[in-house]
Image (cartoon, grey):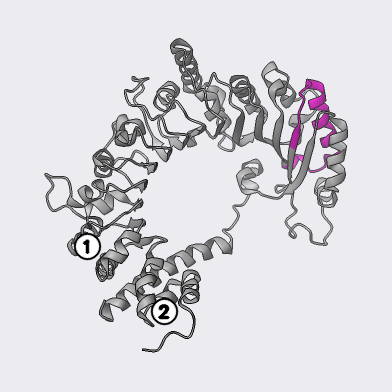
Amino acid sequence: MAGPAFPIDLLLMIMEVSHRHTSSRMMRTCRTLYRVGARMLICTGVSLRTSEEAISFLRFMRADPDRRFPHLRSLKISRGNFSRSGVHALRGLLCHRSLALETLTLLDAEAVLLSDNTNPLNPPTLLMAIASLQSLKHLVIDGCDAIALSLLRYMIAPLQTASLDLGLYTSWSSSTNADDRNPILLLTQSSDSLRELRGSYFDCNPAIIKFDVVYPAVRLINASYTSSWMPSTLAYIHAFPNLEHLSLTSTSNRFEGNGNDPNTVPHLFSNRDCNIHDQENYDVTWEHLQEVAGSVIDLFVLGLVCHVPTVRVLDDISARMCRFLHDVIADMKPESLVVTVAGSSLFAAGGPMDGVLRQPAAQQLRHLELELCFAPRDWDVKLEDILDNISATFLSVGIPLHSLGLILNYGLLITPQGPPGSSFERACPLERELVSMDCARAEQLLSDAIPSLQDVSIRLSTEREPHQYMLGAVGEDDMPTGSEGSSESDAAEIEEDFAMFMLEEDDAGW
């Protein structure tokens, strides 16, 4: 048999960057590409959505098991409703002695596991096959109910990262116990190895403030919770003592745009008081925390009594939210603050931000990333006055700020006749000023006005979506961009082509 026209190394490089369908056809040209090409096709991960795909992929893997199974490191199983043959194929794949799977993603996990309901009195065999995986390091799971939650308790692999989307409580949920949604109790088998925890709709029994299990290696938590008595700050401090990055949030704590006033929600204040008192009474808090992120109410309710170098406030700060921002700064005494302010009036002389920053804890601020989102009522405010008010505020409160990153967001001011930069006459004076402003000159003016500043950057933004609540009923939702839709369709096309490849190879005698 004649050798290939190109060196094997070059052909392998071409396969590595080619579409999977192209790579599968190249595999048919010679034995070397046939042996090595399979590794390239599966090493970036495989997604199985139907019984046909599961059966076909198992045949593909068994055609050369010693060279293929060890290279399958990432697997996604989704949609559920697998037939008995499909479940058998999944079990055959997961139980193979050469499998060294490191990342497993289960989408609509409850439906996937319910596909194997041969004996309701015993745990599903598919569940036990997953739970018995010893090489697993990273788990992503969503669509949980009783069976999927039991999977977490059965697992023996020492996970390094876990992402658990536990879903809302609904009328059809089989599991309604708060501790069934408590990650501290769900991942005990990985207590020594877990490093990162992500997820949504966590819960915790409010009667228990300390649990027996400790996760000393966890450095990051990024999750949301579902009940009004969360967060249980002391329970998390005790369970994750070496935490460095925390984002523990609740969607019910977003008040801007929904007409509700957080000052009239009693449990926010009672939870905060309990969290503060627990830390003080037990004389324990986080000692290594570097960054905390969340809405201003999330951070307020946490009630931390420790210094946190970086605080990121994820929602807009209006006048009524300034009292909460004041307490958050008093709690954590950050050196770096990332915050969005809704409306230029907050920096007016003697305005709300003056009160927030005129406190001893704010004197520790050295770095500020400030997004100023102009409200429609700012349409005729002069840009020079806005910059003067910002510099005057910091001079007045005496904060020795070292760096300032200022984003001027005028997305709500853009006149509807055309996009930014078009040549039509703009109706909004502030918008005209912003479009024509000299950012370098404005940076120099701020630097001259605040002597402590060593680094100043100003940029413009027209992002609208997070701030459209300020428009009231007038605001219209932005349509999805074409690029987002195309990326989803591209991903679906890749998965479909891979499934076609496996079926083609079956037909060809794999």
Residue 390 in sight? yes
| Dot 1: element | helix
Residue 44 position within the rendered picture, expressed as x and y whole percent measured from the top left: 42, 61
Of circles 2 and 1, the one toward us is: 2
Residue drawn at x 53%, y 28% as measured from the top left: 289
> How far apart are the two marked residues, 2 and 1, measured between alpha carbons?
27 Å
Judging by the rendered image, the residue that carries numbered circle 1 is 89
Which picture quadrant has residue 193? Answer: top left
Magenta stretch secondary structure, dominant = helix
Three-letter code for the amino acid on which mark 1 is drawn: Ala
| Dot 2: element | helix
Q: Nearer the viewer, residue 367 or 510?
A: 510
Residue drawn at x 51%, y 31% as measured from the top left: 244
**Direction bottom: furthest residue:** 2
Residue 179 position within the rendered picture, expressed as x and y whole percent measured from the top left: 31, 30
Q: Earlier in the sequence, mark 2 or mark 1?
A: 2
Residue drawn at x 75%, y 46% as measured from the top left: 459
Q: From what the image shows, is residue 300 above or below residue 471?
A: above
- Is 387 contained in the magenta span? yes
Image quadrant containing the C terminus: bottom left
Number of the label disc, if any, that sits on residue 125 = none
Three-letter code for the amino acid on which mark 2 is drawn: Met
Which picture quadrant has residue 336? Answer: top right
- Which span of residues is magenta-colored? 376-404
Q: Nearer the viewer, residue 322 or 41?
A: 41
Residue 265 in sight? no
Residue drawn at x 86%, y 48% as measured from the top left: 438
Number of the label disc, if any, that sits on residue 26 = 2
How many marks the image carries: the answer is 2
Q: From what the image shows, is residue 29 above or below residue 362?
A: below
